[in-house]
């Protein structure tokens, strides 16, 4: 009896785990949703002017980079404080540290618990 294995690409496509596939899109969207509470908020533009693609989240506000790094590109004007508790620089890392396990579990459940 011979064993015939399908190519990795066929198996990945069946599971939806190929690069830029549906599981990647779910994971990225789940990260975006989990990150929201860590993104600084004054009037809310930073949180709402966002582009979420299959594998990337881009905050499009003109001041997003300044808020993310906490300092302007020219090295001046450090952010002195963030008005919303729990928010601050590097909000993706804050989210991952606090909620990463939940994001992973949700993604596994989406995949069928595999």
Image (cartoon, rainbow, N blue to C red):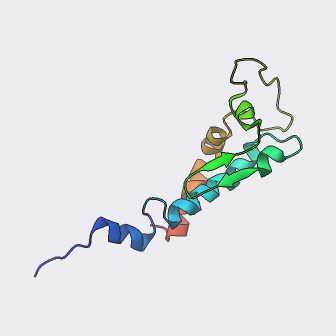
Viewport quadrant of the C terminus: bottom left
Q: From what the image shows, is residue 48 above or below residue 81? A: below
Residue at left offset 82%, top offset 32%: 82
| Nearer to us in this view, 61 or 29 | 61
Left or right: 54 in relation to 32 = left
Vertical placement of residue 54 versus 77, above or below: below
Relative placement, left or right, of 3 versus 33 is: left
- Closer to the camera in the image, 71 or 111: 71
Q: In the drawing, does residue 92 fall left or right of residue 82?
A: left
Residue 93: give x, y in percent of width and height.
Answer: 62, 39
Residue found at the far left of this picture: 1
Residue 16 percent location from the top left of the image = 46, 69
Task: State the residue at coordinates (89%, 44%).
Answer: 43
- In the rendered view, does 88 fall on the left or right side of 58? right
- Residue most extreme to the right: 43
- Quadrant that contains the N terminus: bottom left
Q: Is residue 86 above or below residue 31?
A: above
Q: Residue at x 63, y 53 (%)?
A: 31
Q: Nearer the viewer, residue 5 or 45?
A: 45
Q: Residue 30's x, y, as percent?
A: 63, 58
Which quadrant of the view contains residue 87? top right
- In the picture as drawn, the residue positioned furthest to the bottom comes out as 1
Q: Quadrant of residue 78?
A: top right
Tally the numbered discs.
0
Image quadrant of residue 107? Answer: bottom right
């Amino acid at each position: 009896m011979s064993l015939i294995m399908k190519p990795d690409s066929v198996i990945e496509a069946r599971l939806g785990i190929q690069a830029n596939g549906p599981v990647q899109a779910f994971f990225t969207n789940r990260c975006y949703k989990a990150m929201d509470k860590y993104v600084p908020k004054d009037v809310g533009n930073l949180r709402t002017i966002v582009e979420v693609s299959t594998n990337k989240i881009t905050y499009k506000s003109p001041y997003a980079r300044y808020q993310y790094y906490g300092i302007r590109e020219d090295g001046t004007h450090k952010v002195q404080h963030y008005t919303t508790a729990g928010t601050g620089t590097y909000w993706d890392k804050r989210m991952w540290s606090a909620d990463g396990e939940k994001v992973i579990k949700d993604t596994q459940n989406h995949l069928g618990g595999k």
